[in-house]
Image (cartoon, rainbow, N blue to C red):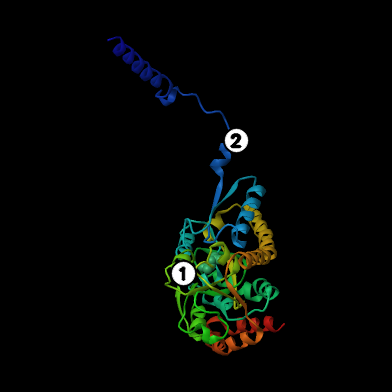
Amino acid sequence: MRTFLFICVVIFSGIASAFLVGFQPESATQPLEYDDEQENLKNQIVIKVSHVVSENTPKGKAVRRFKNLVEKNTNGHVKVEIYPNGSLYSDINEWNALKNNNVQMIIPATSKISPYVPEFQVFDLPFAFNDYEQVEEAFTGKIGKTLLARLENQEGVKGLTFWYNGFKQITNNRRPLVSPGDFNRLHFRTMPGDIIQDQYQALGAATSSLPFNKTYENLQVGFIDGHENTISNIYSKKLFENQNYLTVSNHSYLGYVVVMNQEFWDKLPEVYQVEIEEALKQTTDWIRRHSIEINDQHMRELKLNTSLNIHILLDWEKEKWMENLKPIYDKYESVIGKELMKEVQRIRDS
Ligand code: LMR
């Protein structure tokens, strides 16, 4: 009986104190103390950035840098939320997510813009540029300016600048890729774009355009024999596993376009537009300089820590590839336009 009474007292006092402490009507609670950080939160502008690669790649590191600069220079009034590794949107749906303002910024590879603006395939032309300086000239000169202007015709999208990664290389699990005949009947994962598909077909191979983050599993189950990408993407996503051969072909350049939602951009107070543009300028300069060293570092890791058989394509082997690939230049002149084709030639011969 005593125990029963004791339990009743405990329960009753618990309920009574819950009422006193926690269930008071709202009017009875004290107003929260003023906190200027909360004030900031109310007015904070958030830029959600979605991308598909790892954080230790040129793009992953550059976005983080961009975030730090923007947040510092706007005193935290503009916040940048980064969603890497396709954690929010895959490369297939990030374009629409941007247009619908579900994210405010994406940084797709140029070839991923090609379904909307086919001229972006200029960077997929085989062996279009010989080195990093030529790519920089293309991004910052007539080619880059023309392409960003073309993006203005895309509703809801504002093209801001180009970012750098590196030249693409090819891996596969069957044989060393040295002469065009070595591609025969192999099946490769590629990014979207008619020129990329035609390039493999011209070498006798088949392709599937698959999302970046499905590449590993498709290599693992053997649906594809190989794929092409930059060394930093191959290394950071372990796309060398299940692969025996790597050909350093430098056959085309993987760069990015930084794009924002147009309406979001237009509504930003001018003072923030200026800060964002300045942060982008500094980040672009950073990724231009550091993308090379990140890819080199990852190449050293591949050489040291994997059993990949690595072949560096020689000039005369490249000439052989080009015998098969040259018709692509004629076929796509009308898509890319005479002016841009001439500019590619001018830069390459300079
Ligand atoms: C790919 O799909 O392979 C690349 O576009 C990934 C990236 O963003 O670098």
Q: Residue at horizontal 37%, vertical 16%?
A: 13
Which of the marked residues, 2 or 1, is nearer the chain's N terminus?
A: 2
Amino acid of disc 1: Leu
Identify the residue shown where x is 63% and y is 64%. 301
| Amino acid at the residue labelled 2 | Asp
Q: CA distance from mark 2 to mark 1?
A: 52 Å
Residue extending furthest front? Answer: 307
In the image, is 290 to the left or to the right of 172? right
Q: Residues within 10 Å of mark 1 (few under 14, many from 20)?
A: many
Q: Is residue 122 or residue 148 the one in the foreground?
A: 122
- Left or right of 28 on screen, residue 287: right
User: Horizontal and vertical percent for residue 59?
Assistant: 60, 61
Under circle 2, the secondary element is helix
Q: Position of residue 293 (x, y in %)?
A: 68, 65
Q: Residue furthest left?
A: 1
Q: Say which mark, if any, is on residue 36.
A: 2
